Each structure stands twice: as C-alpha cells, then as structure tokens.
Amino acid sequence: MPRSPGTRSAGARSAVLLLAALLSASLTGAASSPPGDDPAGSTAEPSITAVAGTTADTAAPVVDGLTVTPSTVDLTDGPSQATLRVHITDETGTEAPLFWVNHSLTGQPLETMDTAPELVEGTVQDGVWELVVLIPTDVPNGTWHVMATAYADVLDNQDGDHRDAFTTFTVTGGTVTDLDAPVVGSVTATPHTLDLTTGPRELTVRARVTDESGTFIPYMTVESQDVRVPQQLIDLEQTSGTLKDGWWTGTVTLPADSPNGAWTARVTAPYDINHNYWGDLNSSEVTFDVTGSTRTDYEAPVVQNQAVTPAAWNLEDGDAIITVTADLSDPAGTREAGLFFSSEKDDVTGEPFAFQSSMELVSGTAERGTWRGQFTIPEGAPGGSYGITLDVTDALGNWETLSLDPVVMSYGTVPAEPAEPADPAGPEPEVEFSDVADSAWYFDPVNWMVGRGITTGYKDGTFKPYKPVTRGEAVTFLYRYVDDEDFTVPGSSGLTDVPSSHNFFEAISWATSRGVVTGYSDNTFRSGTNMTRGQVAAVLYRQAAPDYSAPATSTLTDVVQGETNFYDAISWMVEEEITTGRANGTFDPGANVTRAELATFLKRYNTVRTG
C-alpha cells in the first residue's frame, strides 16, 4: 500500500513522539528555568549587550523569556500568524534555536522547520530570536505548547540545564473537532508458539485500527520479555477495510538463536491524518512463546568488584564528581553498562532528582574487563542519600540490574541562628527525623513546622535541613502556614509555566493573587529556581505588610542602604528578631535559603505575627 502523504518512517515517528513527550512533561511539571531576579516581581527587561567570545567557554546556551504573540490566535476568518520570540545568552555565541509547537491534548505538531528563526535584537551572545509561524484553520482549538531549544553554541557546547524554555498559547476558531488518536483493537499472533528446532520461523501479526478521521500506517515491535535482543520494528500493511476502520498485517522472521521464553508483539498506530497521537488506546499487544532455540547462554555479565568514590560529599565545596568502577566478566562479552542515580523524592514535588550515565571499558576485554563511569551531581542538588543502580547487558542481550552502594550528598554546617524566642503556642510534638538531632539549632523550628502541618518531611524519615528551597516550595510552605480561608482557587494562575495541573498551582495562585510573590516579566513563575535568603526576607516582609521605616544603616556588614536588594525587608527582620544574621556579622542575602533556615525564619515570623 502506498505511504500516505506526510507519513514518517517508524524511526522518525519515534523521534517525534519522544520530543512530544518531553515537551508535555516539561510543561506539566515543575519548571527548571535559570535563576532570575527578585521573586517579588522585577519588571526589568534583559539587556542586549554583546559579550566577547572565548575558547575557554564550556557552557551551553541559556534560554529564557519565551513568548507568543498574540496569546490567543483566532482562526475564524482564516489562517493566522503567531510570533515566537526567545531570549538566549551564551559567552561565545549561540546557533539559531529550534522551536516546536504541539497541541496540549492531541500532540498535533505545527510545522516550524521550514523557516529559520531570525536574530531580531542584540547579538548571538545576548539576543532575541524570532520565528513567525502560520497556523492553518484545520487545527484543533485549545491550548498549544511551545518549546524553544538552543541546541548548541558555536563551540558545540551542548550539555546544559537551561537550554530549553516553555510557554503556551490558545487557538480559537479551528475547524478540527477530532481530538482522539487512533484506537488499536484486537491483535493476534500466528502461530502462538514458534518452534525454532528446525530453523528460523515467521510470525504474522494482525491488528484492527479505527479512527474517526483515518489512521496513518501503524507499525509493530517484537521483543523478548526476558532478554534484550535488538528490537524489530516493522510497518504494517492494510489488508482490508479503510483508514477509518481496517485490518493491518505484518510479518517478521525470528532467527534460530532467538531466546526461548515469552515474547511480546506490540502494534502502535502513532497518529491519524490530523496528527492526533496522544492517547491511551493507540497501541495494543499480544504475547507468544518461543521454543527450540539454539541459544544456550542466558546469563548476564557477572559483577566481580565494584567501587563508588567518593562515598560522601559536601556540595558546599562545589559539584560532586562521582566515579563508579566495576569489573565485569561474561563469555559472550559485555555489550554495555549504564548507571542510574536518584535522590529521595522531594516531600513537596514528589519527584526525585535523577539522572543516568553510560560506562566505558577502560582496561581488559569485553569478556573480562574494568568499566568506569562518571557523573556530576551539581552544587544546589538535593542533599541526602543517592541510590545507584548498575545496568549491564552482554552481547547476546542477557541483562541484569544491580544496586550499588549509595552516595551521600550534604551541605556544610550553617552557622547557627540565635536561640528561639519563646513561642506562646506551647510545646511542639516530637520530631523523629533521622537527620534532625535534639541538639540541632533548627530542632524546634522543624518541630513547629510539623506541628502546624506545613511539612511532613521525606518518605525516608529525613528532613534534609541543608537542602536549598525552591520558589515553588517556599510559597507552598507559606501557603500552608497562612491557611487563608478567604482564598478561592482560580481556574488559571495567569502564568505560562503554571498550568492547573502544576504541583504548586494552588500555592502559587494564592501567592500571586495576594501580591506576596509575582512572576517574572515574561509571565513565568520559575518554580524550580532556588530562593535566596534575601528573597525570602522580601516575601515575609510583603506578607506582613508592616508600617515600617528602615534605619539609615544596618547592623549587618553586607546590608547597605542603596546597595543591597531587599534592604528594608532585611532590616525589618533584624528589628523583629526574625534574624540576627550569620555568626560573622553578615546576612548573606544572595545565598540559597535552606529548609532549616526557612523553618527558623517562619517560626520566628509566627511569633511576630501572633504577638
């Protein structure tokens, strides 16, 4: 059957689906934008100043300030244009960014690759890039997601945490009403058992696919459930019916050394003619068995020795570079080895800080050799224990996942704040966090937080007192503390990176509606950005809204009127004994605030608030 116009190959479809999944996950989870200005709402626009490049530049571009104009595109009178603009900085200079636009429910993409973005302001070191997109009438209405990516700079620096920016816009007047992806119904495999005793055998898979508008070509994957053999991916052919309701067939040959055991054949109809491809029913599978294989080796590589160094690290000393070595042996040869690191789940977001890394053979042979892998846990990452798993696969696809010794990330001891003023609320319930000792300077504030229902700690029984607090977490703690009974949760936050499904939606909506915290000038909130001590002072000051005049000078050596941001807020905190600063006579307003410090500030603020 001829391929329908615009149909992608199976490999290209996989790439498109992966990108769409990344775009959706990034827009619905906590944002991870670069650190910004005053969380209380700086309106300053980014300056467009060229910076001289240097071959010492090893950082990837930083992307922020993504906007869409207009924010609502009306197609009632025909196709219309939307202007996408993004701000990118890089020491040496960035390549042109890439833009992707997908419907929030269906995943339908808009074509954005026909025209290259133009640099319309500034320079390639610090400038604004623009792309004008034509939106046809035959698209669905509703919310559309936009992602801008600066893939690399002119030195090909690609690895960075802030290469992407996200936003949304709304379409009205579109003519497409079919928002559903294709449905894959009955799937059969013939024969149900493949006996390879006499040699390779063919497997035939049939599937029924239905779609209101008509499906594009479905494909199937065939893989062992127990052994990592190379996955076979094959386009199906239509054998009866129509694109709206038809039967599709594919045939695959399994070689004689295919592993015995259970196998899965999965049929996927990736999208329909409207490019709807996000659905729960667009794939279905059937199992079959393989017997009589000539294969005899089913054992994964053996890990004989393994080491993780360092076993612990103070992130205040900088990034932690973790090295893992393992001696692996396997008669068929180790094909690949990989590492997966993961912190405990955050008690607010419910998500771990996780990443993965590959390993390389550094000595010996694939049959018996030493493998090594490294990964960097950046300064500012969560403290606590990081679990490590080692995933090994041999040349025949035999694999196993092993747990290695964990590494512990911590933050150095913060100089103690002075003793707490007496709290009229009386004694607090006992805390049994494994990392909060009775003698700790933050013991009482943490107790108080638990007693007020502001935090429950982490699932592993820790509080992580030295973990930095993000903007989203900070307003969540304050929201729980204030317990504003007059607040009605809105249908929208009004911020492009805080949809109603956002983990911090309710708390951020409250904070912005009450004027305690506002978003940035690009209409984002950046909930994943760490809060500083100075910013927390500003938030508490605005929440208290005191009738206060700051003195001309501060008792803190790094808090100077006319030079220090949040001077009034910090001075007020000192006067109300919410803080007396560090032991060295400074306040350190630019340092990230930790969970222990925020608990201390908030408890003392409560004393001021309640008298």
Image (cartoon, rainbow, N blue to C red):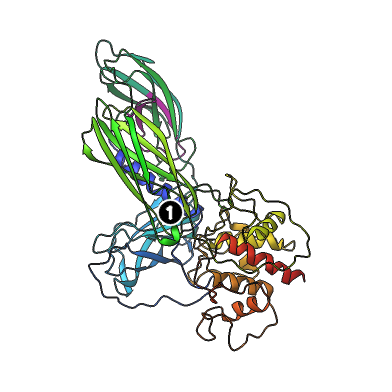
Identify which amino acid the numbered label 1 is placed on. Answer: Trp
Residue plotted at (59% across, 57% down)? 505
Residue 535, quarter of picture: bottom right
Residue 233, quarter of picture: top left
Number of callouts: 1
Q: Check the image and report above or below for 230 versus 505.
A: above
Q: Residue furthest top?
A: 198
Quick check: is 41 in the magenta stretch?
A: no
Residue 96, quarter of picture: bottom left
- Magenta residue span: 206-228
Residue closest to the eye, 331 or 81: 331
| Residue 243 as seen in the image, left or right of residue 584 | left
Local packing at callout 1 (Cα closer than 10 Å; few below 14, some 14-19, many 20+) is many
Q: Check the image and report above or below for 515 versus 212.
A: below
Residue closest to the eye, 316 or 282: 316
Q: Residue furthest front?
A: 439
Quadrant location, the N terminus: top left
Residue closest to the eye, 31 or 116: 31
Residue plotted at (58% across, 73% down)? 581
Percent x, y of residue 76: 48, 60
Residue closest to the eye, 198 or 311: 311
Percent x, y of residue 492: 59, 60
Residue occupied by mark 1: 313
Circle 1 — which element? Answer: strand
- Is residue 138 at least partly visible in the picture? no
Q: Check the image and report above or below for 235 versus 533.
A: above
Quick check: is 218 in the magenta stretch?
A: yes
